Each structure stands twice: as C-alpha cells, then as structure tokens.
Image (cartoon, rainbow, N blue to C red):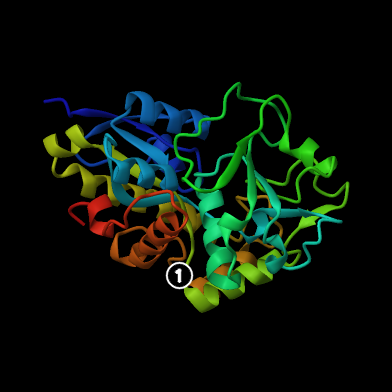
Amino acid sequence: MSQPSIRIAVGDYDRTRALVDGSVGVEGFETRFATGDLEAIFSQAFQTAEYEVTELSFSNFLIASVRGGCPYVALPIFPSRSFRHSAIYVRAGSGIATPAGLAGKRIGLREYSNTVALVARGMLSDEYGFDPGSCAWFAGDVDHVERDTIDPRNWPKGVNIQAVRGRTLSSMMEAGQLDALIAYTPPAVFGRAGVGRLFPDWRDVEKDYYARTRRFPIMHVIALRRDVAEANPGLPKALLAAFNQAKQVAQDRLAIHQALPVMLPWMQAEAESTQALMGQDFWPYGFEANRDMIETQIRWSHEQGLIPRRPAAEELFPGW
C-alpha cells in the first residue's frame, strides 16, 4: 500500500538539506519538497495554502492566526533564527550614536510586520526603552525596486508608516531622507555615505544579550495545514522527528575536522564557542524548549500593535 504524499515548502538550509535530498524521511509519508525564494513561499502559503507543510514568517503567521482565518497551525520547528542587533543601520549625521538616539527618527524597513522588524523593535524596547510610536516609518524595497504596491494590511493603527514606491530605501539613506534602516542583509549603501551599524560590535552585543536573556529569536516557523493536521494526527510528531534528525545531521557536520565541509577556516572553533555559550543543542526545536521565546515574540507583537490580543502559546501550537 502506498504511503500518503505531502508537499513541503522550505528553505534549502544545512539543517533541512537531509530532508530535501531524501536521506532523511518523514515516517509514514512520501514527501516532495519545494525550495526557492522565501518571500514567494510565504506569499503562496497565505494566498493559496497550496502546500500541506510550509515555512512561514513567524510574525506574519502570528498576525494571521490571531486575526483569524489562517489555514495553518504551527509546529515547534524553527528553521530560521537570528539575533537582529546586526540588522540596524544608521546614517552619520543623523544624531544616532546610541539606541536612545533612534527616538523620533525616520526609519526604513522592507515590511513593518515582518519578523526582523518585530524582533529588532522588541529587543530595542526591552533593552533600551525604545518607543516605536515615536518614529516615522518608511516601508519599501531596500536595494532594488521589486514591488508596485506596498501592502498596508498588517500596519498597526496609530503608527506613522508611509509606503515608499518607485525608489529604494538605500537611495533615501544616501540622500539623507532616512536616519536608520532595518534590513536582513547589509544594504547597498552600507559602508559609504556614512552608513554603518548601530552596533558596530554586534557579535559581542548579541552574545551578551543571549547570556543575559537566554533568548535566540525565531524568524521562521514550520506550519501544517489545518485540514491535513486533522486528517493525520500522527503527522506533527513525525515531522518534528524528521526535522530534528535532519538538524542533527547538519550539526554533526560541524564536528568534522579532517576536511572542512564548510568554507570557514575556524569552523570548529566557532562551533565550540557557540556551544560553550548556548549549549550542545544551540538551535532547539520543540515547544517547551522555546516557550519563553514564543511568548516573548507574542508580547512584542501585541505591544507593537500588530495583534489585538496576546494568545497563549498553546493556541498557536495546539497539541504540544
């Protein structure tokens, strides 16, 4: 008898590679994987729910779930995590020398509701008393004009947010029309026009943040379509087991000394340093191991006006 088939849309990471190449399977199911542009994967999930299992922006999943009508439920699998102190860029001459200097400034970002922005604002609020409502926000494309329209549906009420169309946030930084920018990767203007990071020593700052809070922010979550979850009650745990196994394969590769599998000369030293600070399983899956981080990001979303109420974490991760 053939096994039921599920389609999984996910980023092609070291921690998912064993799943994508078929060396790790999901027990009881035949799997087909789709990888590619993550923004496209997220958009497709929210618009058509084509895939039975999909990676999603944690922030936008949270918003859709609380506001109602989200076709997916979350699994405690987090394929993308990042500290975001390094994602905040400032312009010389803006008067921003410390996080306190962001108050009342003009700040650009790709999307007000995406997870990098949620986490950056939340961290700044918790650590430095930052008030997002004091700023003027500009939502648009960072280095290349990619969108004809900027979707405002997730913008909170009472926050000054303007859509930027037909030009880039990088060009606005260069022209002195923005004071700061939150971006996934260094913008094209980084390193010129006086643009640098708010935290030049960002790695040390992020390590200190983790040492004090034990928080490793969640960027993306794996989600299962509700109808599939109801029809296959054993599937959530089978998926968690498979993703955990694939993650372990990736972690084991970091311990290879003979011939480095990754083009980093001091890969072993980096892995050992990370484990010394964060523990052997420094990228944990599972609900209880991530409860505090999940609840913190729910709190940030509510404080920032992205969601109208603070749901219990169990509401987003039913059955865990």
Pick whichever, 159 or 309, lies toward us: 159
Residue at x-position 64% and y-position 53%: 135
Q: Is residue 214 above or below residue 26?
A: below
Q: Taking 40 as reference, is 51 left or right?
A: left
What is the quadrant of the N terminus in the image? top left
Residue 129 visible, this orientation: yes
Q: Position of residue 195 (x, y in %)?
A: 82, 51
Q: Position of residue 3 (x, y in %)?
A: 17, 29
Q: Residues within 10 Å of mark 1 (few under 14, many from 20)?
A: few
Residue at x-position 27% and y-position 40%: 26
Q: Is residue 128 above or below residue 21?
A: below
Pick whichever, 11 or 210, lies toward us: 210
Figure quadrant of residue 41: top left
Q: Amino acid at mark 1?
A: Gln
Residue at mark 1: 280
Q: Position of residue 157 (x, y in %)?
A: 47, 45
Q: Taking 181 as reference, is 120 left or right?
A: left
Residue 25 visible, this orientation: no
Q: Taking 129 as reference, is 223 left or right?
A: left
What is the quadrant of the C terminus in the image? bottom left
Q: Residue furthest bottom?
A: 212
Q: Position of residue 139 (x, y in %)?
A: 61, 38
Q: Is residue 25 above or below residue 316?
A: above
Describe the element under mark 1 as helix, strand or loop.
Answer: loop
Pick whichever, 10 or 19, lies toward us: 10
Q: Taking 230 as reference, is 40 left or right?
A: right
Residue at x-position 47% and y-position 68%: 215
Q: Residue furthest top?
A: 148
Residue at x-position 36% and y-position 58%: 285
